[in-house]
Amino acid sequence: MTTSAALLLLLLSPRASAHDYPIFPVDVVLRVEPDRVVADVDSDSVYWIEEVVELHPMPPRGWTAETLARAEKYVNEHLRLNADGRALAGKLISAEYVQRPWQYNEQGRFRLRLAYPPVEDAAALSGEVDFFEDYRRERLENKEPLIPGKMDFRAFLSIPGKVTRRFELKPGTVSFSVPVADARRGAPARFLESAAAGASAIVDEIAGWPALIALALSLGPGTTARRRAALALGAAIAGTVLARVAAPIRLEWTAGALAALAAGRWLGAAPAAGMNAAALALLDAAWTGAARPGLPSAAPGAFERGAGAAGILLVVLALLSAGAWAVDAERRRLTTVSETRAGELFERRRRLAATVLLIVCGCGLFSGLTG
């Protein structure tokens, strides 16, 4: 009798109680470029992982062809574009799962970039956006509530151009339309967009953060602002040449290991300068490669690549300067502990920090080579 009752309760329990996925608004930026249209989709990751790509664990990049195809298909089904009534099919050209260190389980963001055919001859660009609409309808059909504060089925669409258009799309109001002429952007806007793509690569590529910390440790104190600028500029030039090398994450972990060795001074002070330069060049190469899909052209020219490099260079200089200031401040603070032994205390602490960073980067590099 107990078993029968348990089975009855199981059958009568709400079927989708385990599928109360959090739904948050999707951000979409639609750009009309000279040789294509691009859609950048930024969305909470939970529903995508569970119901769209169905991949566990979810890797940051390097998705399988099947996973990419599922993500591309889902976007095309729920972001339907038209140029003068002609349907445009999107091709997924960039995809990543971004999970910050403080996030866990399936928390994070899906960032997808799709490219569409050019619309140079069209008068209007229109479409419909209804992400997660199938899930919303399923709950309504099953008479399950749409949980306030947890399920928000809106999409925020932005179309930058001569006249920037913004749309708040939601169930019942999913359509939009803009003149193509208003959505075109001039050279200044594309320069800023390219520079922003370079700067964003540094923020998003967290595998490079330990390398930046190690470089700050190695370069400060004692390195002038002019020397840091010369080092960053030289690394930017070298990194542009190296950017064609594959596996950017391996480049970042390798750069971190080199910078940590330089900061620890185990090989002496003389080789440290060369290792710092090599580490920064590898970092720049990784960031340049990561920024390329975000440049406003299917085939970025010198204009877009140069602007992207400028964005990387400016952020690198700012971060290295801030890091050098912090390290120098710690060096000065140690003089209040012991004026005679401040230098010795600083070197010990720098070596200890370099050891930790070397272990972190070594593990990252090993994981990248074996993963």
Image (cartoon, rainbow, N blue to C red):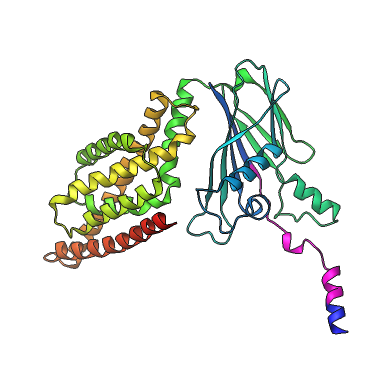
x, y percent for residue 292: 44, 35
Quarter of the image where one finds residue 165: top right
Query: Split into 4 quadrants, where in the image is the N terminus?
Result: bottom right
Please report the residue visible at 31 percent of the width from the left and 34 percent of the height from the top: 241
Q: Is residue 18 magenta?
A: yes
Residues shaded magenta: 7-26
Residue 255 left/right relative to 200 = left
Residue 265 seen in the current view: yes
Q: Is residue 147 magenta?
A: no
Residue 32 seen in the current view: no
Instruction: Report the residue that reaches farthest toward the left.
Output: 340
x, y percent for residue 293: 48, 35
Query: Split into 4 quadrants, where in the image is the C terminus?
Result: bottom left
Residue 363 left/right relative to 97 = left
Please report the residue visible at 85 percent of the width from the left and 84 percent of the height from the top: 2
Quarter of the image where one finds residue 69: top right
Please report the residue visible at 84 percent of the width from the left and 73 percent of the height from the top: 9
Instruction: Report the residue that reaches farthest toward the top.
Output: 121
